[in-house]
Image (spheres, grey):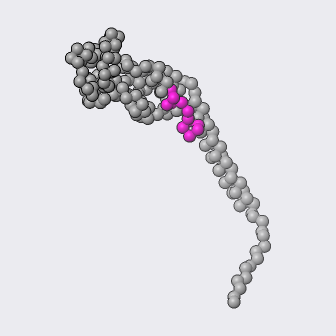
Amino acid sequence: MTTIKRKHHKHRPHSKLAQRRRKLLFFKIGGIVLALLLIVTGVVLGLRSERINITDINIRGNSALATKALKGFTEDMISGNFALVFPKSSIFLYPREDLQASLLNSFKEIKEVEVSFESLQAISINIEERKPFALYCGEYVEQEEVEDLNIIIEEPEEVASSTLQNMSTIEKESECYFLDEDGFV
């Protein structure tokens, strides 16, 4: 059996030049880390500034959907932070595509939606709602009831309350659904 012997080196002190280089390296690394922290802090504080945070949400094109519901939904979408630090309400960071997709998924009455930049504190949500094109009922509907419903279909923005009352008799007899021109129920 062979044994390996290690040479024991005496601990010799590092030269002053090596110590100076090591201190300089630590100083450079510390300076870079500090500079990065200052930059990130400045960006975060800048993004949290009220001057560039969304405070006004303008909704256009809705008639059947409540503006209050759409604003509340949008405010919920842009509240909170990305990575626990960067505010979603910043005009530079707000999730425009996610907001559009969520509005389409949550409000089936919306046919198309476009979210756009209006100013440093405002966004605009332009909505195109689905318009009633036809009525589908699972059972037979009397002719005069269909004529009453045609008023709704021809004039969706100006629906009379009496026409809606007439429609309630149809709903009691069978379930009816509006279809848009694309066939969406």
Within the magenta stretch, is there residue 81?
yes
Q: Which residue is drawn at 47% across and 27% down?
A: 74
Q: What is the x, y in percent for residue 86? A: 56, 35
Please state which of residues 168 and 111 is positioned toward the viewer in this rendering.
168
On the question of residue 107 being in view, the answer is yes
Please state which of residues 81 and 180 is positioned toward the viewer in this rendering.
180
Res 154 → quadrant:
top left
Q: Residue at x 52, y 32 (%)?
A: 88
Q: What is the x, y in percent for residue 31? A: 65, 46
Within the magenta stretch, is there residue 85?
yes
Q: Which residue is drawn at 33% across and 14% down?
A: 164
Q: Quadrant of the image for the N terminus?
A: bottom right
Q: Which residue is drawn at 35% across and 11% down?
A: 161
Q: What is the x, y in percent for residue 42? A: 60, 35
The boundaries of the magenta stretch are 75-86
Please state which of residues 132 and 103 is positioned toward the viewer in this rendering.
132
Above or below, 57 relative to 21: above
Res 99 → quadrant:
top left
The residue positioned farthest toward the front in the image shown: 173
Q: What is the x, y in percent for residue 35? A: 63, 42
Above or below, 3 relative to 46: below
